[in-house]
Image: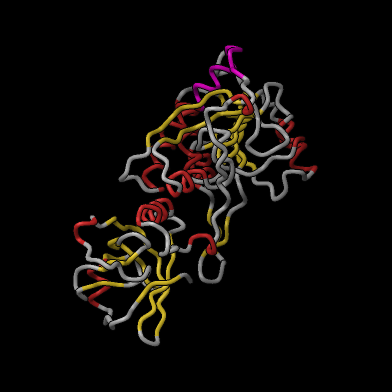
Amino acid sequence: MQKEDLRIIYMGTPDFAVAPLKALVEGGYRVVAVITMPDKPVGRHQSVLTASPVKQFAVANNLPVLQPTSLKDPGFLEELATYEADLQIVVAFRMLPQVVWDMPRLGTFNLHASLLPNYRGAAPINWAIIRGETVTGLTTFFLDKDIDTGAVIRREEVEILPTDNAGSLHDKLMVKGATLVCQTVDDILADRAERVPQAELTDSPMNPAPKLFKENCVIRWEDTTKNVNNFVRGLSPYPAARTTLVHGEGRLEMKVYEAEILPASSMVAPLPAPGTVETDGKTFLHVATSDGMVALHRLQPAGKRPMSVADFLRGFHHAGGSHFEGI
């Protein structure tokens, strides 16, 4: 069978899933339908429906789109079966019931943004940076009944630079992931796809990558400078590290998008308590950690736009004794 004859159903929702779909379409693979999340209500009154990035691409390229509310709905399953797919591909979508992933004769594979079995879960890109990794990667694997546990087809390493944040790493993985998806389809077509049990991949540790919520995005200033900086990088630009500036009788919640570890030579002993603020009120805002200080460069006070520290300080009157703490 040639690639133009292989009937593929593609499932995905965010920007990360657009690049592989685009590569398949432009590469001459036969995508017979696209499945994505229902349009999302946005706006002040939730009255405007916005299509997912994957749907927008599919519509622009005249691909049939299915948007089931439930993947177990009999009507959806009946419609899905009419496409007679040989293969299904899942990229940043949702957990599939067995009746869906077991439907194609060649199975269903997923692209995951880590070197499985490391960083299974919803936020592998964020957690790899938060935990100070210097290497991450991508994995394609066949789906089975447990999330992110199926037999591995391909893995590819990707370097994490000290200057990377979650946004830049996302973009690097997105580009490489598009190529990896096409290579995996070619492997399956040529009947050379590996099926390596994840239990045999002993070179990879087992750090989790749980979903990120407001509660686990709060900066712990009592941690080390390295860990605080990695935390900010790993959550930037989304969902962003959070903290509260306490000044006098006031409290100001904010997001921090960019920070920098200050060299030890710039600090004086003894170090102030973690969370203590040092600033000239004009150009810099330094915060103490357990073993040093970090310089904040870009932040977003509650109700305001993201801004540089200099812009923030122009509208903020610093009072002695100001400090940061958890929300």
Image side of residue 299 versus residue 178, left or right: left
The residue segment tinted magenta is 181-194
- Residue sitting at 62 percent across and 40 percent down? 35
Q: Quadrant of residue 30?
A: top right
Location of the N terminus by quadrant is top right
- Residue sitting at 60 percent across and 20 percent down? 6
The x and y percentages for residue 326 are 46, 70
Residue in front for this viewpoint, 101 or 320: 320
Residue in front for this viewpoint, 94 or 56: 94
Q: Residue furthest bottom?
A: 249
* Scheme of colours in the image: secondary structure
The x and y percentages for residue 246 are 39, 79
Q: Is residue 130 above or below residue 12?
A: below
The x and y percentages for residue 60 are 48, 40
Tally of marks: 0
Image side of residue 8 versus residue 310, left or right: right
Q: Quadrant of residue 90?
A: top right
- Residue sitting at 32 percent across and 67 percent down? 287
Q: Magenta includes 172? A: no
Judged by its main secondary structure, the magenta piece is: helix
Q: Quadrant of residue 121?
A: top right
Q: Residue furthest front?
A: 270
- Residue sitting at 25 percent across and 74 percent down? 313
The x and y percentages for residue 138 are 49, 32
Q: Is residue 92 above or below residue 282?
A: above
Q: Magenta includes 185? A: yes
